[in-house]
Every structure is written in C-alpha cells, then in structure tokens.
Image: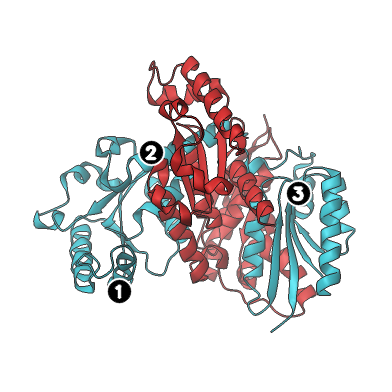
Chain colours: A cyan, B red
Amino acid sequence: MSPTRPVFIISDHTGITAEIIGKSLLSQFPGEAFATESLPFVDTLDKAKDAANRIRDAWKVSSLKPLIFSTMTDVEARAVLDATGAVVMDVYGHFLGMMIGELGRPAVPVKGQSHSASDVDAYHDRIDAVNFSLAADDGLSTQKYDLADLILVGVSRCGKTPTSLYMAMQYGLKVANYPLTPENFEQPGLPESLRPYIGKLRGLTLKPERLAQIRSERRPNSRYAALETCRQELADGEKMMSEAGIKVLDSSARSVEEIAALLRQSLLKQDK
Amino acid sequence: MSPTRPVFIISDHTGITAEIIGKSLLSQFPGEAFATESLPFVDTLDKAKDAANRIRDAWKVSSLKPLIFSTMTDVEARAVLDATGAVVMDVYGHFLGMMIGELGRPAVPVKGQSHSASDVDAYHDRIDAVNFSLAADDGLSTQKYDLADLILVGVSRCGKTPTSLYMAMQYGLKVANYPLTPENFEQPGLPESLRPYIGKLRGLTLKPERLAQIRSERRPNSRYAALETCRQELADGEKMMSEAGIKVLDSSARSVEEIAALLRQSLLKQDK
C-alpha cells in the first residue's frame, strides 16, 4: 500500500470541470492512495494564496508531492499555485495557450463560463428539459409526447428515470419514460400511447438477476421482486420491443452516463 | 463575423469529460464561430481513422484548422488524431504524462473510468441518492429526513427540484426539498417537519420578477404567478428562514451547478 498523496481540486468557479478531469486521471492509477480536497470559488488572489498554503501544509504532512487539478482563469492566481512546486495540471493554462496560438486572439477570461447561467438560452433549455422529464416520468403526461426528443420504454426499475433526468440535465433533451407493466403484455402490440412515436422510442432492459436485486431493495420478498417475475417481465418486454422494431439497450453493466451517451448517439445518427 | 471553425469532441468512451472541457474553453472566445461535432465511443483504431478522416474533410471545407478536444486512452489512437495536424487537446496525452512522471509508474488505461459504473459503490450511492431525491421531492417523504444530507427549503418554483437532482447525480448527496406555501406563513416558526433538522436546512430564494416570470410559464395570468404574490411569498419565506437561522442562497443569476457547488461547500465547511 502506497502512502497517501494529497490531491487538490481548485477552481475559481464551481470546480466541476476540474473535478471531472481529476477523477478521470486519478482512476488510471489504481493502487495509489489519494486524499482529495475540493476548493471551489477561489476567485481572489488572497484565496489563491490560502489555497497555496494548504497545498504546502499537506505536502509537509504527507511528504508526497501534491497533485493539483485546476481551472483558474486568472494568470496571477495560476502563478501562485505554480509557485508551490506541486504538480499543477491546469486546463486553462495549457490548452488555452494552444487555442490562443491557433486563433491568434486573446481569450476573454470569464470565470466558469461552462457552468454558469451565462448562455441563457442553452441554460433555460436544460432546465425546461428537466421539468419536462419530471412531468413525463413513469408514463405521465403522454399527451406531451409530441414535444419529447426521446421516450424511454422498459419494465419497472430498469433505469429509465435516472437516465431521463441525466439526459435532460446534461444534454438539454426532453426525455419521457413509459413503464411496461404485465397488463401491457396481455394486449398485442405496443401500448396505444406509444404507437404514434415509434421513431422516438428506445428500450432499456437488464439482466433478471440485477432487476430482482434492485426491486428487492424497494420491496423485499415481494412477488414484484421475485426472480421469476423479473425474468418473465423482461422477456415479455424485450419481445414486445423487438417486434415493434425498437432499439433496446442493456443497462446491467452500464452507468447512467454511458446509457445516456449511447442513446444520444443513436438519436443523432437517426437525424442524419 | 468570423468564418466557422470545425470543432470535434472525440472520446473512446462517453465523451462527457472532453465535452465539458471543450465547452469551457470555447466559451472564452466569444465572437468566434464554432461548429461542434461529438464522436463518442471511438474505441478501435479503425474508428480513430474514421474520425481522423472526418477531421481532414471538415478542414478542407472550412479552411480553418479544426480544434480537437479528446480523451483517448490508447496511445496509437491518439497518434492517429495527432497526425491530422489539427490542434489536438488531449487531456490524457498531456496531463497523464505529467502524472506518470511524478508517480513513477505507468497508468492503467481503462477507458472512461470516470463515467463508467466501475467504481460500483460510488455509483450505487449516486443512483440511490437520485432515487432518494425523487422520493423526497416537493415535501414528500418527510419521514425520511433523517437520511437526508441536505433539505432545501423555499417557495414554489425557486429552483429546489433541479438543484436536488443535480446534487444527487453529481455528488451522490441525498437532497430532499420542502416547499414553503402561504399556509406555512400563517403559523409562527418553521413548519413542524423541518424543525428537527435545522443543521441540514438551506434556503433558496430569488428575485420576485424572475419568480413571476417562471411561474407565468406554468400558469399564465394566474394569482400564483402575479408579481405581488411572488413578492409577498418570497418576503415571507426569507423572513421565516432568516429567523430560523437558515442560510439562504439567491438563485436568480446562478445556474443549478453553481448553486449545487455553493451548497456542497457550505455543507463541507459545517462538517469541519
């Protein structure tokens, strides 16, 4: 076991970009021990100096050189972090330099543009999409399906709701979701409310064992959570969706982000 | 108006990291015209070659050198993109090199670790948190407040729900939210269900004009959306929260991400 190395996520804004980059890079060194601290909203030179002092203190305590993931728009503040001698990986410092070289013009250092509400239209679209997805969760608001970018279909607890919300939040897509229930399987063909929207439908499924586990957390020892029930519903659901020509994704070993990115890709391909 | 410059977001996985970095950097060059295309799941050498061809084609059409934001774990695939001669900003190529130098050991290039379900516990925590936040939305499930990390309080439509969901999804925090209604203001003190949880409560407020605008989208020309109603409810809410010693954030000019990061920071500070 290696000793613990201090890691700081430092940003003059929310720190979300720096956090994602840090997480992504640290995960490629399994077996190393990291102690991560987030310092968002470091937006004055004094705060940058405080952050630099914390870096120096942590370095003294651990004796391992700290890693810094940062997004600092202010050149002076960046220099304060650099002066600690830690490994400073600053997205703006490096890549912005490349962009300025290519575009032949200076950057306009507005703090944390990507996670502010400054692009008002895009931001409203995302919030509208979240509200749409909440209103059209779990088979509600089928009268609004005309407005949906995507309608997720699948049996209860197969991952539709988190996926819908994530796609709305991240991509600004209006995603409805419709649960397939045992009653639906008694009728031939797709449920009526889905039929006019075949191009917007995508299916989710997963392994019966995984579904039984998820349902058991909600209603232990119920018929609803029994492996046999899950197996039957999933089989019926997959059959219905495949007969209707709906593309189905298996969410068993995929994160919400992975499913969301795959679904978005399948929508973009269709649009072309 | 500048001519449009091609931009590609290329990843061997979801592309979420590359997309966030690209958005953040591009936003610092207002006035430049960019045409952005996302190519996720470029996870074979052949797909990397296809991507390189698209870069070359786009360059020919626009005559401006394309910008590439990428996260490619495979060194060969990265070389294929570099060979296009475009401005390739690859997070792994640059920062991973710095980390390997410092840690003195090779990286384990697992694709898209940060957005996969590979850290199973952390991933389940996040999905649990999303389910909690949905179940405890809008004053529901107050009997579960013991389990909440945070309970957001504020009048109807002041941003509680998207903030709760975002914090759950991004940080794995269990965030409930409780709406303050005119009936609450007729009684002295906080609503009863909130009183045992004072340390977990945070308030949201916003400008009356903004609230009236948001409510009007939902119910145009209603008493609910009238500026006077909004002004009164917000004043009553702010008074109630300030008397109870609840920290209140103004969400008028802040994005969900900004509010989420500020709230999380205030929770972390309290824990210390």
Say which of B209 and A251 sits in front.
Answer: B209
Q: Chain of mark 1?
A: A
Tag 2 near tag 1, CB within 8 Å:
no
- For the residues beneath circles 2 and 1, the answer to whether they share a chain is yes
Q: Residue at x 37, y 52 (%)?
A: A161
Query: Relative to the observer, which residue lies in front, B135 or A155?
Result: B135
A216 relative to B180, above or below: below
Give x and y (percent) for residue B4. Answer: 62, 38
A220 to the left or right of B47: left
Chain letter belonging to callout 3: A
- Number of numbered discs: 3
Quadrant of the image occupied by residue A131 = top left
Q: Residues within 10 Å of mark 3 (few under 14, many from 20)?
A: many
- Give the Cα distance between marks 2 and 3: 36 Å
At horizontal 61% and vertical 46% (from top left) the residue drawn is B263
Q: From this viewpoint, which residue is outermost toward the bottom?
A: A1
Residue A99, x across and y down, in percent:
74, 48
In percent of the image, x 62 and y 31: which residue is there? Answer: B253
Front one among B99 and A226: A226
Residue type for callout 1: Glu
Q: Are marks 2 and 3 in contact (CB under 8 Å)?
A: no
What residue did someone put label 1 on? A209
The numbered dot on residue A106 is none
The quarter of the rendered structure image containing the N terminus of chain A is: bottom right
| Nearer mark to the viewer, of 2 and 3 | 2
Asked if badge 2 and badge 3 are on a common chain, one would say yes
Label ID, residue A96: 3
Under tag 3, what secondary structure? Answer: helix
Which x, y percent locates residue A126? 49, 39
Circle 2 residue: A132
Q: Nearer the viewer, mark 1 or mark 3?
A: 1
